[in-house]
Structures are given as structure tokens and as C-alpha cells.
Image: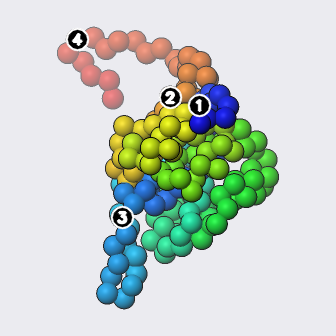
Amino acid sequence: MRARSATPPGKIALLILDVDGVLTDGRLYFSGRGEALKVFHVRDGHGIKLLMGSGVEVAAVSGRRSAAVTARLRELGVRNVVQGCNDKVAALLALTHRLHISPLACACIVDDTPDLPLMSAVGFAAAVADAHPLVRSAAHWVSKAPGGLGAVRELCDLLLRARAEDAGPQTAPRRRAARPGTARR
């Protein structure tokens, strides 16, 4: 189902995250007041922060609206958040226009069939391990972890490794080895 070959992961400038089923396990918990509660994995959040620290933009685009999502992404420092979105390709094009990034320099990670058009519009399409079979077959890469349980961290680590490999070997000053019985501070 993939329409084009993947953009090399080290060339990705923007990662677009679906929320339900990707940053969460896809289940919705409702309180007695009707508020939806969501659970986020701390390792996914750390991966997002590491990726942003390396210079990759991160965005979340969700079909639902959630105060929990707003709070979690604000806590992580994700500035590009689109909620209540009926057209994720239009959201992608608006983001890439504003950030001056080609859609082919973007990656997304998704879990269900409404996201197939977004997958076709980006350069690197990823799916969580428990994504719908059509989504997994359309993906350039599939995580080992299911949504909400470290899948985003896996993708962040892949992108970070690829960026480091593309940058080449680092030339750090060499340190002399400590003599046995002595410690460096």
C-alpha cells in the first residue's frame, strides 16, 4: 500500500503524533462527570523531549479534544498541537507551511485507518505494533511496543540514532585513562 519509498529517518525535521492509540493505549476512561481520562507513558514523553532537543519539531494532531492532552503536551514543551481535527492532511500542510518544512521531511506515527491519508502525505510513515492491519501494512516502520506503552519512544530513538549516524563521528577531546586505583571526577 505504500506509495513511495521512505525518507531516510535521519532527514526527518517534523514528527507528527496521533494521540489516541499512539500516545495512549487507545482506551478512554470516563469519570462520573463525563471527563475523559488518559494515561501517558513517561518514556514516550522523555523520547519526545530528547527528539526536540536534537532539533526535530514535534506536533500532535488528534481527532478528539482533550484537556489531558493539552496539559501533557504543554508539560513536554510541544508547541504544535492540533485537536478536534477532521482533516489531518490539511493540518500537516498548515504545519509544514508555517514551519517551512517539506511534507516529505515529516514522519508520523499512527494506529488506525482514518490516518491512512496522513501516512501517504509524509515521507516516513510509522505505525504502533497494535495498529489496524491496513495501517501496519502501509507503514514504512512498525514499533515493537503497542500504543501508549513506549511505541513513540522507539520511534524517537530510531530518529535520534539516524540523526547521529548522519552527523558522522563526533570529535570529542580524548581523555587520558585513569591509572588503576585512581578515579576521575
Real-space Cα distance between discs 4 and 3? 55 Å
Which label's residue is closer to the chain start, 4 or 3?
3
For mark 2, give the secondary structure. helix
- Give the distance between the C-alpha atoms of the residues marked 1 and 4, in whole angstroms: 42 Å
Numbered badge on residue 161: 2
The x, y position of residue 21, in whole percent, is: 43, 56
Going from the N terminus, do you reach mark 1 or mark 2 first?
Answer: 1
Q: Which residue shows up at 53% across the image and 70% down it? A: 64
- Disc 4 designates what residue? 180
The reply to whether residue 145 is visible in this rendering is yes
Question: Which is more foreground, mark 1 or mark 2?
Answer: 1
Residue at image location 73% in from the left, 58% down from the top:
90
List x then y, in percent, for residue 140.
Answer: 55, 33
In the structure shown, which secondary structural element does the residue marked by tag 4 occupy? loop
- Mark 3 or 2, nearer chain start: 3
Residue pictured at 61% horizontal, 45% vertical: 119
Seen in the picture, residue 104 relative to 147 is either above or below; the reply is above
Q: Residue flagged by tag 1: what amino acid is it?
A: Pro
Q: Amino acid at mark 4?
A: Pro
Q: Are marks 4 and 3 in contact (CB under 8 Å)?
A: no
